[in-house]
Amino acid sequence: MAPPNITSIPLELLLQITSYLSTTDYGAVRLTCKDLEASLFKTFAQQYFTTIPFLRIEFSLQALIDISKSRLSPYLKHVMIHPLHTPSHADEVSDWTYDPDLDFGSDYGPPRPNLRPEDLDRPEDLELYQRFHQFCLNQIVLTGTGHDQQMLVEALRNLSLETVSIVGSTPSASESRFARSYGHIGYGTYWVYRDWQKKDSSYSRETRIYDKVVTPNTSFLQSILSALGKSGVVFRQLKIVDMDQITDEALNIPAFMEKTILPMLSNLEALDLDLKVGGPSRLNQISSDRIVSWNGRIVSSNGRKPYRIYNYYLGKFLLHSNQIKRLYIRGSGLSDDLLAWLATPTTDEEYHGHPGLSPPMPPTFPNLYELQILKGSSCGYHEVNVIGIIKKFSTTLRRLHLSGLQIEMPNLGRWPQFVAQLTRIGNHLEEVQFSEMGLHLSRPEKSCYKNSLHMKFNQSKDHLESRHFFYNGPNMEKVLGDLVKTTTLCDRYD
C-alpha cells in the first residue's frame, strides 16, 4: 500500500486547505504535479478568472484574446474594460512627458516626468524615458487605426459572458482577488509599470496615468460600444460606470452604428449607468450635477414651442434598452427632467411636429422588475415624478431602491400626503430600500427655517434612528403607511 500523500487527500479537504494559501503559494501547489493541478483547476478558475479588469492597451487585450482561446474561457463571465489615457496626438507626447503639472510622486510613473530628455543624465533614465515615449506613440496608432477594437471583437466572440463593464477610470486593486493578490490595478498593468518605474517592487493603486489631462472618456465609451456591437455577442448586463467628464453626446448612436449596437441593447436584461457630468454644464449655466450636452438638443412636442433638453441621447439609449428587467441609474447623471420623462405615461398618440425636432418617446419597460436610483444630485426631484415612476411600472416593478434623492414638495404639509400616495401605489412592491433621503421644500412654512430636511428612519426595536430604511416582506402596505410616524425630518445628520 502506497504511503499517504497530498494527492490522496479527499478533494473537499484539499480545497479547504488551499483556500488559506496566498496567490503565490496557491500557484506553487498547482505546479507540484498534474494530479493536483487537475484537482484544483476548477476552483482556481472560479476564484481568479470569473471577473477580470483589462486595459485598452495591446498587452492587456492580447491577454484577453489568449484567455478566450484557453480552457479558462468558460469561467470568464465578467469583463471590465478600462482606459489607459495617453496623449491622443503625436505632437502632444513630448510636451506631456515633461509637464511640470504632472506629479506621480518619487517612485511612481515615468522617471522624472517634469524634466526634458536633455536634463536626464543617467542612461537608464534616458532609456526609461524613451520607452515611455514609444509606448505613447504606439498607443496612438493602436486606437487611431481601430486595432484595439479588432482585438476586443476577436476575444468577445470566443467568450460566453454575462456582464460587460465599460469603466471610465483606471481599475483599482480592490476589484478582484487576482488584482488584490498581485497588487495590480488591472490585467496588464504590471507590464506597464514594470517598464515605467524605477522600482519593480513598488506599485500604487492610487497612481493614475494621465490624471492631470481631461480624460477622453467620450471616445473611449463609443469605441467600446462599437466593438461590443460588432462582436455580435449576447450578454445579460451592461455597466457603464465611473464616467467622468462626458456629455450627453457620448451616448449618441449614429445611424451607421445602429445595425450592430441596437440588437445588443435590445437583448439586455440589466443596465447599470453611473455617469458624471463634465465641464459643459458650466458653459450652459446648467446645474453641475447633471449630465448635459454642450448645447442641448432642440425638440418640439405636439402643440409646444421648440425647447432644449439636455438628456436627449441618454433618453434614446434607455429607449433602445426597453426590454431590461433591472435598471440602475447612479452618480450625478440624473436630473429631474429625466425622472419626469421616465414617469411620462406611454400613449399611442403620433408625433405631428417636424420630424427633425421629435423628442425621445418615453420607455415602456414592460419587464422592469428592479429599479435603483442612487446618489442623485443635490437638486430636488419632484414628488410627482417619484410617484409617477412607481405608478407607471407598477405591473412588473417589485424592488425599489432610492438613495441620495431630495424629494421636492411645497411644504411639510405635503409629506403625509406623499406617504399616503406611496402606500397606495407601492403595495405591490416586495422590497423597498431608502438611503440618505431628504426633502426639499420649495415654499417652507415660517415655522420651518430650513428648506432642506434629512430623513431618519426608526425600524429597530430599541428605537434607534438610521439614515437607511429597508423592508422585504408581506406587510409592505402597513410598513409604508407607518413612514409618517417612523420617519424623523431634521435639518442635519447627527
Image: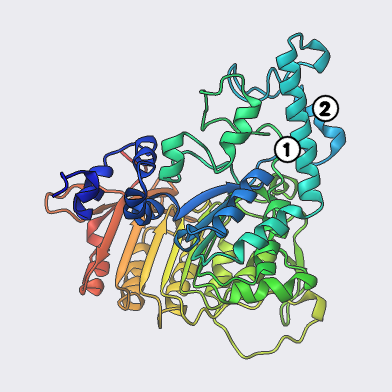
In this view, the residue farthest toward the front is 1
Question: Which structural element holds mark 1?
Answer: loop
- Locate residue 241, reporting x and y percent: 55, 53
Observer-nearest of 86 and 202: 202
Which amino acid type corresponds to the residue marked 2 in the rendered image?
Ser
Residue type at mark 1: give it.
Answer: Thr
Please state the horizontal and vertical placement of residue 130, each as a whole percent of the image. 77, 25
Q: Residue at label 2?
A: 94
**Disc on the earlier residue, 1 or 2:** 1
State how far apart marks 1 and 2 are (Cα): 12 Å
Which class describes the residues within 10 Å of circle 2: few (<14), some (14-19), or many (20+)? some
Task: List x then y, in percent, for residue 376.
Answer: 50, 54
Identify the residue shown where x is 56% and y is 19%.
Answer: 199
Total numbered badges shown on the rendered structure: 2
Residue 400, located in which quarter of the rendered image?
bottom left
The C terminus lies in quadrant: top left
- Whether residue 325 is visible: yes
Q: Which mark is residue 86?
A: 1
Report the residue at 75% width, 60% height from top. Answer: 296
Q: Nearer the viewer, residue 456 or 95?
A: 95
Secondary structure of the residue carrying numbered label 2: helix
| Residue 243 visible in the displayed image | no
Decide if residue 467 is on the left or right side of residue 282: left
Indicate the quadrant where residue 293 lies: bottom right
Note whether 157 is above or below 215 in the view shown.
Answer: below
